[in-house]
Amino acid sequence: MPIALEELTALTANLVAIDSTNPDLVPGGAGEATIARFVADWLEAAGLETTTYDLGNGRANVVGVARGSGGGHSLMLNAHMDTVGPGAMPAPFTPRIEGERLYGRGAFDMKASLAAIMLAGREARSLGLRGDVIVTAVADEEFASIGTQDIVRHLTADAAIVTEPFGFELVVAHKGFVWLEVETRGVAAHGSLPEEGVDAIVKMGPVLTGLEALDRELRAQPGHPLLGPGSVHASLIQGGQELSTYPDRCLLAIERRTIPGESTAVVEGQIADILARATAADASFRAKQRTTLTRDPFSVGLEEPIVAVTRAHLARALGREPTVIGAGGWMDSAILAAAGIPTVIFGPDGDGAHAEVEWVDLPSAARVAEALIGIVSEFCA
């Protein structure tokens, strides 16, 4: 079913014009309350059963349901409303159209995608479907994903599509991550008293070399067929008080990127092994580790019905088979999959996510909406 490019453009422009900067990324950011009101009003006017979920502190989700007659598969369409900060982008919330491109903060990541799921949800009402089409406009994907975490507490579906912008490539896997900290302990003393001091920063040395060795080991493995191997790196380090004092503490922040099949427990064990080897080599080595945040990797079986249906409709929109890929970055799809909802990812073309120049290709966004309508027509029939 064709979507008028003019309507898609106007809706995307209206969404870009609303500042929805994530306040956990930029102190004082607007959050999602204003854009949530706009989305809720639009979905309600389009005839969907609409609910706004207040997440507190100016954060909100909006859910619109095109209710089926019963007996069909339900499909969730997901897009986030929040954006990163504007940085040095001039006039970030004044949408600018040049040719087939719409410029502005969030145009690509991912307000054109949000417009596409809103339009697809509206059209679903007239298709005589048996299954429900559930439009979820969520908060906070750019930081802690409290939006989609809240969605799965209230709702489920037989499948989901996350419309992150990937230029019509079909994403069926992505990496996760584990963030950890290692703290080494020393003994503070004046620099003139080396017999009394123990240098906590120096004690971090075997941890750093152990991480380097672990990263080499990981990268030597074949890994996931679409994602390759996992990886690890030292992200941040701090310690010491002044030049004339032995530091009594050094803190290292670590990121371990994970692939499907690698659990948090496996990662924690790898870091514990590094500390155990350092302890065995140096009786004065003292360290502890803790995990600060985990996000699971994601994959969906190619045999899942939503994969086959999506692949067919993307091929129709493209005039060729879509490229099936894995993505390095983490997305809300992992939360949906962990809740038992088979999920795929695709979205429009463009560039500049998190950059100073951001734009979306408008015809490709219209094709996303059309592909979504085709998918719901088949999957929810």
Image: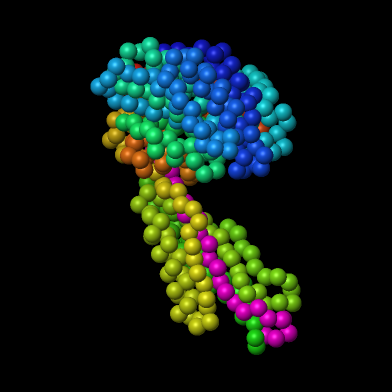
Q: Nearer the viewer, residue 364 or 96?
A: 96
220 is higher (above) or lower (below) than 161: below
Instruction: Determine whether, in the image, residue 4 is placed left or right of residue 14.
Output: left
Residue drawn at (63%, 26%) of the image:
18
Q: Is residue 192 magenta?
A: yes
Quadrant housing residue 243? bottom right
In which quadrant of the rendered image does the C terminus lie?
top left
**Image side of residue 76 versus residue 349, left or right:** left
**Residue depicted at 42% across the width and 60% down the height:** 267
In this rendering, the answer to whether 169 lies above or below 219 is above
Q: Which residue is drawn at 60% across and 74% down?
A: 200
User: Residue 350: image x %, image y %?
Assistant: 56, 29
The answer to which image quadrant residue 372 occupies is top left
Residue lying farthest left?
71
Residue 52: horizontal and vertical position, in percent? 49, 27
Q: Residue furthest bottom?
A: 195
Taking the spot 48% from the left edge, 59% from the top edge, the residue there is 291
Q: How many numbered marks appear?
A: 0
Whether residue 142 is visible, yes or no, is yes
Q: Is residue 364 visible?
A: no
In the image, 290 versus 328, the foreground residue is: 290
The quadrant the N terminus occupies is: top left
Q: Where is residue 144 in the image (x, y as percent from the top left)?
A: 52, 44
Residue nearest the observer in this picture, 262 or 217: 262
Between residue 347 and residue 50, name the one nearer to us.
50
Magenta residue span: 170-194
Where residue 67 appears, x then y in whole percent? 35, 19
